[in-house]
Image (tube, grey):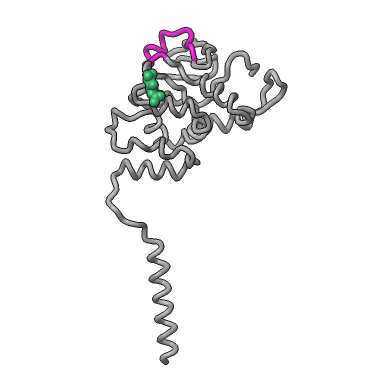
Amino acid sequence: MARFALVIGLTLLYSLLTSAQLVPNFTPISEETFAEAMDQDRHPFEATSGLVFQNTETSSNEQTLLDKLPRDKSLSIFLDVVMQVPTLVHMFNNATLDPAVTVFTPTNGAFKAFFDTETMTEHGKESGRRILASDADMHEFLAYHVVPSGKLTFQDLAKASTLETMAKKTIDVKHSGKKAMLNGKVAVSEDSKVIEAKNGIAYKVDRVLTSLNDID
Ligand SMILES: *[C@@H]1O[C@H](CO)[C@@H](O)[C@H](O)[C@H]1NC(C)=O
């Protein structure tokens, strides 16, 4: 009987201990800090996490692109690529960036399609994964999605015929109904999801932009 009680006792103690391990360390935490912790969990940010999440106390209109973009789960691949390119990390994290930037941020779906599809490039048939092979290629790829001439509104885009990118190559803009078509294939409309931060504005797009030199 005593032995039985001991077993019950140990079992109870064991379950108490194991359930105690499942109880998170509870400290009051702001919703923002929580959102950022979640984001940190989701992205392989280890190397730069101090840099990325240093501005946890800034108010929403003081936040940078690097504060705001990680909140959108559908931009996690874009962010993962950005984190590989320090110049872009510093730019997106710079609250006093002048001029601010306009960024076309491809969604995860856009990246998956780009990575999985082989196209003819100057080096022959390759999938979009080629950009991950070198820092220079990732930089070039991202820089082509950044227009360093302030926060362009949709009306600005609707008036433009070309956009000069940070990659020193232009994006061609055509207009079709209420849409601006970038390089004839990436649509931006008044309804496009926009993320505005202190140092820039990001338009979510559902295809990646490749420069017109790429046959595609
Ligand atoms: C942020 O941008 C401003 C203006 O573009 C520049 O003068 C400053 O050096 C940048 N700060 C950092 C930390 O790069």
Rendering quadrant holding ligand 1:
top left
Magenta residues, start to end: 149-165
Magenta segment includes 42: no
Q: Give the residue displayed 37% in from the left and 12% down from the top.
A: 155
Q: Give the residue displayed 39% in from the left and 75% down from the top.
A: 13
Give the quarter of the figure containing the C terminus: top right
Q: Give the residue displayed 47% in from the left and 26% down from the top.
A: 88
* Quarter location, residue 148: top left
Q: Position of residue 202 (x, y in %)?
A: 41, 24
Q: Could you tell whether 33 is left or right of 40 in the image?
A: left
Whether 55 is drawn above or below 176: the answer is below
Q: Position of residue 79 (x, y in %)?
A: 48, 33
Observer able to see residue 191:
no
Give the quarter of the figure containing the N terminus: bottom left
* Quarter location, residue 188: top left
Q: Could you tell whether 89 is left or right of 26 in the image?
A: right
